[in-house]
Image: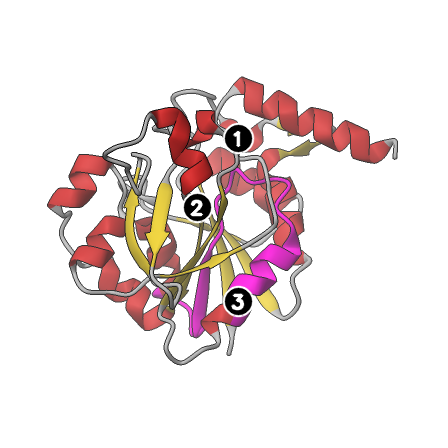
Amino acid sequence: MKTAIIIPARLASTRLPEKPLADIFGKSLIQWVYLQASKVKDVDVIVATDHEKIYDHVAEFGGRVVMTDPGHLSGTDRIAEVARELTHDIIINLQGDEPLIDPRQISDLIRMMHSDKVDISTQCNRIQDEESLFDYNVVKVVKDHHDRALYFSRQAIPAFRDKRYSEWLPNAIYFRHIGIYGFKRRVLLQLTGLPPSELEKAESLEQLRWLENGYSIYCSETSYTSIGVDTIDDLERVRDTVLKEMFR
C-alpha cells in the first residue's frame, strides 16, 4: 500500500516559541524529525505547516512541504488537508516534536496498517514509574485482548477502589499512549468531518471523538522510547542525548 508520512508543524507554541525551528547541533527540530522519517523505506515524507518561516526552512533543506490553513485546531485536521490531495492508501501522522524517533517504530506502525481490519492505529508502552502514572500530561490507554483501545485518559486507569495510590502500579499494567497515528486515508477524511464530542472536550483528547463515534483504534505495545519536545527542558534533554551519541 502506498504510504505517506505527514508531519504537522505549527510555528506558535505556548511553552516553547517557534519550537519547530529550535536548533539541535546545526539542524532544526523539524529537520531532525524529517530526516528520521525519511529513513523509512518506500514512503513519501511531507511537512504540513501553517507558517511561511517553516515552509521556507523545510524547502531550504530540501524537504517536501505544504502550506495549510492556519485555522486548524489539531494536527489531524492539518494532515487531512494534505491527504485530500494525495492518492496514498495509508497516512501516518508523525508529531513534529519527536526528533529522536526510531524509524523502526514508524515501520512497525505501517506494518500494522497493512491489515485489512485496521483503519486507525497507534502505539503505547508500559508505565514504569509512579510519577508518570499520576501525571495528567501523560496520556494513558486501556485496551482489550485484541489490542483495540477501550479508552484514553489523563487519569490513571484502571483505578483501584480499595488500594492506596502507592499500590496501584505493582498491581496492574498501565500503558502510556504514544501520539503517533496511522490512518487509512478514507477513514482519516471521515474523522475530520466529525463534530467535537463531550468526552473529547472533557479530557482534551481528540481520539475520544473517534471512539465515541464507533471507530476502532488498534494500539500496539512498543519497546521504543523517544523524547517529545514541549519545553526548553525537553529540548536540552534531546541535545544531551544527541551529544552523547556523537561521542560514543
- Residue at (27, 42) in percent of width and height: 205
| 102 relative to 243, above or below | below
Q: Which mark is residue 229?
A: 1
Camera-near label (2 vs 3) is 2
- Residue at (56, 40) in percent of width and height: 98
Measured Cα–Cα span from mark 1 to mark 3? 23 Å
| 73 relative to 81, above or below | above
Q: Is residue 41 visible?
A: yes
Q: Is residue 43 left or right of residue 239?
A: left
**Magenta segment, which residues?**
84-111
Query: Is residue 98 magenta-colored?
Result: yes
Which of the two residues, 218 or 59, is positioned nearer the viewer here? 218
Residue type pointed to by label 1: Val
Measured Cα–Cα span from mark 2 to mark 3? 26 Å
Camera-near label (2 vs 1) is 2
In the rendered image, which residue does mark 2 sit on? 173
Q: How many marks?
A: 3
The earlier-in-sequence mark between 2 and 3 is 3
In the rendered image, which residue does mark 3 sit on? 110
- Residue at (57, 63) in percent of width and height: 108
Q: Which mark is residue 135?
A: none
Which of the two residues, 22 or 108, is positioned nearer the viewer here? 108
| 171 relative to 222, above or below | above
Residue type pointed to by label 2: Ile
Helix, strand, or loop for circle 1? loop
